[in-house]
Amino acid sequence: MADTTVNLTIEGRPVSVPVGTSILEAAKSAGVLIPHYCYHSGLPVAGVCRMCLVEVEKMPKLAPACATSVGEGQVVHVYSEKALEARKGVLEFLLINHPLDCPICDQSGECELQDYTFQEGRADSRYREPKRFNPSEDFGGDVLYVQNRCILCTRCVRFMDDVHDAPVLNVSERGDRAYIGKAPDADLTQPWAANVVDLCPVGALLSKDFLNKARAWELDRTASVCPGCSQGCNITVETRDNAVMRFKPRANESVNGHFMCDEGRFNYRWLNRPDRIEYPTVAGKPADWTWRSRPRPTRSRGRRRTSSRARRSRTKRSICSSASPRRPVGW
């Protein structure tokens, strides 16, 4: 029987992973984060962003970590000079037409382009030509597309094609004119369409429900379960000042994978209703309601309460019936 594990070294750390594992996932298991945009563990591999380029000894050129399987005895360098220079070049190209919208972008604070630019990008820009500008587009449903911020990772396209089985998005045009297009007369109103907002690594796809509502660093996050149905999708509840701002899916492969339905996603608004009862009331007025002052219930648990008159009547009927089966005495 062939060995089912592969041993390799990533950034000096020995790693053992199953056969067929990508270098990116192997590095993740070793605690080494390889920057990436197009790769997502819940989507088919595309290898289009080239941000995960790493140096593998004895390979003639840099390899995309998301699309390269591990091999026995491999030695992978994530932060070698050659790999860092290549990723720096990729970031420079991505930022050529990307606007400086960070102060007003809803994705600011949780944007992967922002993070990797600070981590590995250039300190300044060499681009002097005018930036391309395109208007935003309403994709329907809860999704707003800001084309100027798009880096064409195609996560949204692959989700709608391969996961949702609703091929309404595509990559239109070519070169620096390429953008995410929508099929004619089609809107993102499908039951799971809002997941494309979570998948977008930058601020190109925005939730109209969350637009300009809060900043990412202001939110408190609590792991929970969606209250919408019995499926039990794992979610993260994001709150500010004890008010729920949004629900986001939390990965659990055995329950909901990486996604959640739109009905559950927007089923938080009732939690913030101002007319919800926030304190005990009696006859519509505030009342002190403690366990000691709680009145005795009118019904006992598991046994029906009856009045003393009914109990006496039932006892009398039983006695009379036993005295004469034909005619109750004194009835």
Image (cartoon, rainbow, N blue to C red):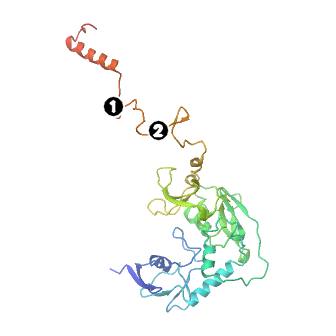
Q: Position of residue 270 (x, y in %)?
A: 58, 47
Give amino acid for label 2: Trp
Q: Decide: few, some or many residues near mark 2? Use Cα within 10 Å; few <14, some 14-19, many ≥20.
A: few
> Circle 1 — which element?
loop
Who comes first in sequence, dot 2 or dot 1?
2
Quarter of the rendering occupied by the C terminus:
top left
- Identify residue for label 1: 303
Quarter of the rendering occupied by the N terminus:
bottom left
Evaluate whether residue 16 shows in this view.
yes
Q: Quadrant of residue 122?
A: bottom right
Q: Which mark is residue 28?
A: none
Q: Position of residue 195 (x, y in %)?
A: 58, 61
Measure the alpha-carbon separation of dots 2 and 1. 25 Å
Q: Residue lying furthest right in this view?
A: 130
In front here: 124 or 264? 124
Image height of 115 relative to 260, above or below:
below
Residue at the (33%, 31%) spot, across then down: 303
Relative side of 1 to 37, left or right: left
Residue at the (59%, 73%) spot, across then down: 38
Q: Position of residue 302 (x, y in %)?
A: 34, 34
| Labels 2 & 1 near each other (Cβ < 8 A) | no
- Identify residue for label 2: 289
Image height of 257 relative to 151, above or below:
above
Image height of 127 relative to 281, above or below:
below
Image height of 244 relative to 96, above or below:
above
> Circle 2 — which element?
loop
Q: Position of residue 211 (x, y in %)?
A: 67, 59
Give amino acid for label 1: Arg
In this view, the mark in front (2 or 1): 2
